[in-house]
Image (cartoon, rainbow, N blue to C red):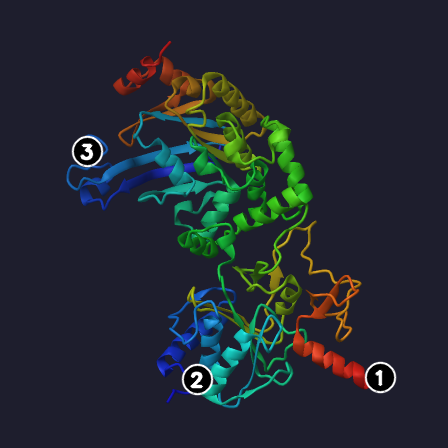
């Protein structure tokens, strides 16, 4: 199957960088920091494919570069090196890291959807929940208020936001409701892929379960591909067909979820799998 | 005593440079080195600097403020310009070659040989929805006007209609969102595919922008909540009887409940003269 998204040798360095850490793979680096120039290597030599409809999980400890990858795909961070190809843009022949600012904005607004752990990043707190979702349709060129509102209401109903709360500002919502609005916002333009950055982090367990249930049913119903970042192995096991394990900004293991969780090869993966409280 | 038109030649050249760039990129706000003037920022210094930079000795000048040629602001600007250039000053819209205005566009359509200079208090149309200058610059660069459209959406959602009264945001040449200055919505269609050149100067904010002739100017709107101008149906000016001009409500004479008068005084005079001649 032709991949929907191909990430090739993605690299992100915070700091100037030096020949040592800019080389691929970085030489002499034991962890995230270059011993020569002290630049932070957030991620390096990241390559993977996502096929249509697939849910890919990215796991790893805090600071291992998981969110950096998502932000590079969403083009909110500019990568230091590498290439990303997206099937619905120029038939996947053009590197989306190289596009101009206006095209980048179009890709972000119309082709990708992103759900952040922190709703402050994903929602506009000055406008209503409904307005937040409508914004994405407006930037995609829809201008008919009635039609937009119908679509938005349908989707908000699907993500189970109570209709009496549609007009409220996001700061009047509970954490779970904020995530539901973010998910609706990511889905409204029916993108082929959505990016989830720990969507259930910071929520209590029962709300977490319902949000995960929603994400799972949406991925089937909308046949949308997902890249999901989490440090929670249970969440990953529930949702993802395939996972990537990261440490110090590099992929150390990847494969089918069941294989990686039941038979982890790397020492770090073993620790990660076994440190879950049962 | 003074240089012609008060400003020194290099200052004028700076303003003209900004004007040329502004005309080349319709609706784009060009930063310029706004000068100190013998009037306060906020009293029309942006418009005044443009006028002083493009005025020639043969120009016929009209300065008006909210349609009125005799307001304190307009009279003072006119005196300053006349004192330093010696140009002829007029109240008649048709007779003027250079028109400086605050918050109105004349009712009479302008010709290709006339230039309209508008005073701008707040050049950034996105300021209503985004307070950071760095962000608004980025939004213009990327044509990212989603927040402004959401403002319209929220208006309709909460109030059933778009609540922007004056300074209605317009999309110029299908590219840049622009503040048309606090002119009433009534005047916005006059900027679309106009015969004349419109120049906008914001002295305090140090920005110049322009709409060249024959340029598309579209007010932002939603398909099912289209842009509308103010409604003056069943109202007429008590002085000239016009029903086709922008009207101001004025103190009603004894016995009357409401009274309206033309905001554009020159138009009102002309209309009254032609009507009386016809009688």
Q: CA distance from mark 2 to mark 3?
A: 67 Å
Q: Looking at this view, is B36 or A240 the one in front?
A: B36
Identify the subunit bearing mark 1.
B
Residue at 46% x, 17% y: name it. A205
Query: Pointers 2 and 3 in contact (CB under 8 A)?
Result: no
SS at circle 3? loop
Residue at 30% x, 19% y: name it. A269
Q: CA distance from mark 2 to mark 1?
A: 44 Å
Marks 2 and 1: which is nearer the front?
Answer: 1
User: For the view shown, which residue lies furthest in the top direction?
Assistant: A278
Q: Is residue B217 left or right of residue B51?
A: right
Identify the subunit bearing mark 3.
A
The mark nearer the N terminus, 2 or 1, is 2
Residue at which label 2 appears: B5
Q: Looking at this view, is A32 or B279 the one in front?
A: B279
Dot 1, crowdedness within 10 Å: few (<14), some or many (≥20)? Answer: few
Residue at which label 3 appears: A29
In this rendering, the answer to whether A140 lies above or below B140 is: above
């Amino acid at each position: 199957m032709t991949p929907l998204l191909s990430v090739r040798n993605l690299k992100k360095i915070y700091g100037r960088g030096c020949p040592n850490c800019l080389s691929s793979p970085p030489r002499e680096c034991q962890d995230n920091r270059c011993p020569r120039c002290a630049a932070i290597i957030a991620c390096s030599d990241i390559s993977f494919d996502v096929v249509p409809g697939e849910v890919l999980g990215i796991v790893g400890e805090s600071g291992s570069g998981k969110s950096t990858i998502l932000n590079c795909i969403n083009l909110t961070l500019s990568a230091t090196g590498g290439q990303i190809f997206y099937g619905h843009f120029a038939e996947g022949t053009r590197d989306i890291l190289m596009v101009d600012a206006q095209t980048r904005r179009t890709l972000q607004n119309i082709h990708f959807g992103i759900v952040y752990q922190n709703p402050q990043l994903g929602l506009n707190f000055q406008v209503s929940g409904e307005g937040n979702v409508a914004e994405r349709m407006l930037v995609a060129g829809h201008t008919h208020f009635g039609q937009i509102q119908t679509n938005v209401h349908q989707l908000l109903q699907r993500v189970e936001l109570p209709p009496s709360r549609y007009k409220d500002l996001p700061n009047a919502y509970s954490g779970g409701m904020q995530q539901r609005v973010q998910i609706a916002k990511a889905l409204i333009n029916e993108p082929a892929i959505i990016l989830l950055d720990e969507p259930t982090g910071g929520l209590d367990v029962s709300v977490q379960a319902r949000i995960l249930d929603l994400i799972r049913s949406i991925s089937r119903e909308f046949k949308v591909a997902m890249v999901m970042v989490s440090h929670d192995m249970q969440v990953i096991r529930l949702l993802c067909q395939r996972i990537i394990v990261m440490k110090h900004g590099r992929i150390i293991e990847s494969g089918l979820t069941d294989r990686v969780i039941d038979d982890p090869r790397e020492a770090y993966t073993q620790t990660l799998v076994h440190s879950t409280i049962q | 005593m003074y240089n012609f038109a008060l400003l020194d030649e290099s200052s004028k050249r700076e303003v003209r440079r900004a004007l040329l760039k502004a005309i080349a990129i319709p609706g784009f706000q060009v930063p310029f080195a706004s000068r100190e003037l013998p009037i306060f920022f906020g009293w029309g210094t942006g418009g005044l600097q443009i006028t002083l930079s493009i005025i020639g000795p043969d120009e016929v000048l009209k300065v008006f403020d909210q349609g009125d040629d005799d307001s304190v602001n307009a009279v003072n600007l006119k005196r300053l310009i006349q004192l330093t250039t010696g140009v002829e000053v007029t109240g008649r819209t048709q007779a003027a070659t250079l028109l400086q205005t605050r918050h109105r566009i004349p009712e009479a359509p302008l010709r290709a040989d006339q230039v309209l200079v508008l005073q701008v208090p707040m050049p950034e149309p996105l300021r209503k929805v985004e307070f950071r200058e760095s962000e608004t610059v980025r939004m213009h660069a990327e044509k990212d006007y989603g927040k402004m459209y959401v403002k319209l959406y929220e208006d309709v959602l909460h109030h059933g209609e778009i609540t922007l009264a004056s300074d209605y945001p317009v999309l110029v040449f299908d590219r840049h969102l622009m503040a048309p200055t606090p002119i009433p919505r009534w005047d916005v269609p006059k900027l679309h595919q106009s015969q004349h050149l419109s120049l906008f100067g914001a002295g305090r904010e140090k920005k110049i922008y322009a709409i060249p002739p024959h340029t598309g100017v579209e007010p932002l709107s939603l398909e099912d909540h289209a842009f509308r101008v103010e409604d003056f149906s069943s109202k007429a000016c008590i002085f000239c009887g016009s029903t086709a001009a922008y009207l101001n409500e004025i103190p009603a004479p004894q016995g009357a409940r409401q009274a309206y008068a033309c905001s554009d005084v020159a138009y009102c005079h002309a209309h009254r003269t032609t009507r009386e001649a016809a009688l």
